[in-house]
Image: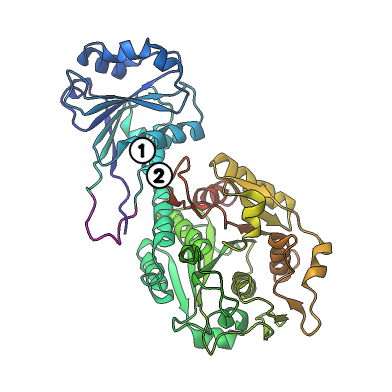
């Protein structure tokens, strides 16, 4: 799997600048003010940095952007990377600036002179997030990424501040790796094996196999996997870092490792992208990894339903009626609306088994949310305005786009079935909302719940502030922040 970028913090040593190899980064304010490190770089480079900052080119550079001076005279380095950053930049601005450095870094070593950066931990996290690549399935290994050295006046403080942030970045990397994997490598069994490996971090792992799922009555989840040779599973990850006896926050993920649509077969064009249909489960697993790595002081349980939706002689058919673990019956109108079936049973299991303080489910659930919100924001549905506001605040603070979407009884009419308790789809109008309405039927009264439809943000066709094109790991940072803000401490 992908190895996170090697980042170390050291005390500022201006004498080491001239002999530094790779790239040297300096931080300069929009007005062109240089700190001690930048002034030393300028002297060694025979005034090249000062000439650049006095040119009209610097006037066009915005805070958070990087401009590079290639092969500067007087330095061994291949480039001076000039980062424009306000001295009082907030954490999110600082992280975005770090991501700009991570983008230009490539495989080179990077020395960052961060003496005037208030929060070097966020700068380091941004560098790590944007320097990510996934190349596990290429026959020729890429050039190894060079280390990053961040020079600051108080390295011990910087190291302590950065540790939980880099743990979260590690969780993001884990999620991106999972979402990037092709389905012939990330089968339901392999996914469960990778989850089981997290036991080394202190997580309690339980994997429920088909026989036990049958006994529990998870017929909706099992129906999705009937057409596949890959066995359906439910994987449970428990982190008990909070007070003993406190009800946990439950994170629940859709883990459809490949989605053909089943008997309601998808069009061939673009079907290869359905390797990312386990994105919700990927975020849950990455978040649980991050919480364990940073030793979160909270009780959190992550539960993911792992299935593959394939057509075969044993596959569920449109028109079939299937009973849920809750006991409600569902008329299957479209077998391509399978994620909600997986989540419905897992939501009910989470409540029956763990009696959670609150629940959040994540799923690449509907194309309708992409029509509504594009690839900029995830759809947020909730039965509890206070809980929803807390999540939206956490997502905003982490720079992860999210938008509050409506729920309402009027939409339930679209799910009415003549032969069962409900249909699994409500037609094209308000498709993402009716999907959320379906899930809400499996949430017990009084349990705060959020549904996150991440179909538009789990994997994108263009780079973002924190990720190259491809898997983003959206949600790991927001969920870790929510846990830190609302579930840790006294």
Q: Disc 2 versus disc 1: distance between alpha carbons?
A: 7 Å
Looking at the picture, does residue 155 appear above or below residue 273? above
Helix, strand or loop: magenta stretch: loop
Residue ID at (73%, 68%): 427
Residue named by callout 2: 129
Identified at 50% across, 48% down, the residue is 477
35 left or right of 402 in image: left
Which circle marks residue 459 in the picture? none
Label 2: how many Cα within 10 Å (few below 14, some 14–19, many 20+): many
Q: Residues within 10 Å of mark 1 (few under 14, many from 20)?
A: many
Report the magenta residues as a range.
134-142
The x and y percentages for residue 315 are 56, 85
Note whether residue 278 is visible. Answer: no
In depth, the one of 316 and 438 nearer the eye is 316
For the point 25% across and 18% down, the residue is 41
Determine the image quadrant of residue 432: bottom right
- Tag 1 residue: 102
Asked if the residue under mark 1 is in contact with the one under mark 2, i.e. CB atoms within 8 Å, the reply is yes
**SS category of the residue bearing label 2:** helix
Image location (x, y in percent) of residue 361: 60, 62
Q: Where is residue 423 shown, x and y percent of the image?
A: 73, 76
Using the image as rendered, state which of residue 174 and residue 197 is in the foreground: 174
Element class at badge 1: helix
Chain-order first, disc 2 or disc 1: 1
What colouring style does the render use?
A: rainbow
In the displayed structure image, the side of residue 224 where residue 119 appears, left or right: left
């Amino acid at each position: 799997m992908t190895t996170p970028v090697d980042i170390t913090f050291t005390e500022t040593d201006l004498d080491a600048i001239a002999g530094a190899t790779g790239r040297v980064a300096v931080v300069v304010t929009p007005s062109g003010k240089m700190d001690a490190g930048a002034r030393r770089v300028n002297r060694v480079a025979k005034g090249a940095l000062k000439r650049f900052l006095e040119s009209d080119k610097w006037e066009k550079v915005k805070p958070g952007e990087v401009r590079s001076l290639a092969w500067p005279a007087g330095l061994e380095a291949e480039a001076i990377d000039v980062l424009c950053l306000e001295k009082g930049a907030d954490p999110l601005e600082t992280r975005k600036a770090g991501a700009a450095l991570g983008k230009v870094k490539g495989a080179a070593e990077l020395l960052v002179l961060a003496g005037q950066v208030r929060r070097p931990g966020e700068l380091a996290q941004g560098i790590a997030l944007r320097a990510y690549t996934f190349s596990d399935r290429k026959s020729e290994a890429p050039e190894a990424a060079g280390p990053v050295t961040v020079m600051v006046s108080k390295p011990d403080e910087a190291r302590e501040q950065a540790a939980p942030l880099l743990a979260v970045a590690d969780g993001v990397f884990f999620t991106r790796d999972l979402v990037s994997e092709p389905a012939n490598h990330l089968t339901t069994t392999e996914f469960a094996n990778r989850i089981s490996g997290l036991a080394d971090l202190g997580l309690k792992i339980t994997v429920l196999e088909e026989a036990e799922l049958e006994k529990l009555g998870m017929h909706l989840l099992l129906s999705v996997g009937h057409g596949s040779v890959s066995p359906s599973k439910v994987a449970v990850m428990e982190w008990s870092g909070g007070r003993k006896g406190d009800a946990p926050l439950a994170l629940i993920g859709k883990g459809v490792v490949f989605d053909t649509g089943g008997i309601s077969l998808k069009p061939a064009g673009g079907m290869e992208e359905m390797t990312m249909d386990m994105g919700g489960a990927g975020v849950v697993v990455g978040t649980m990894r991050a919480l364990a790595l940073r030793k979160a002081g909270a009780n959190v349980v992550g539960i993911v339903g792992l299935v593959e939706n394939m057509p075969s002689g044993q596959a569920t058919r449109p028109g079939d009626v299937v009973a849920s673990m809750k006991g409600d019956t569902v008329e299957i109108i479209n077998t391509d609306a399978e994620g909600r079936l997986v989540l419905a049973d897992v939501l009910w299991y989470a409540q029956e088994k763990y009696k959670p303080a609150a629940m959040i489910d994540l799923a690449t659930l509907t194309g309708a949310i992409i029509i509504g919100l594009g690839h900029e924001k995830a759809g947020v549905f909730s039965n509890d305005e206070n809980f929803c506001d807390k999540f939206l605040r956490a997502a905003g603070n982490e720079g992860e786009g999210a938008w509050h979407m409506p729920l309402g009884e009027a939409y339930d009419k679209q799910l009415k079935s003549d032969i069962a308790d409900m249909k699994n789809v409500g037609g094209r109008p308000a498709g993402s909302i009716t999907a959320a309405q379906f899930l809400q039927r499996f949430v017990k009264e009084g349990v705060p719940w959020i549904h996150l439809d991440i179909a538009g943000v789990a994997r994108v066709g263009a780079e973002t502030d924190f990720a190259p094109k491809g898997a983003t790991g959206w949600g790991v940072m927001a969920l870790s922040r929510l846990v830190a803000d609302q579930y840790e401490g006294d």
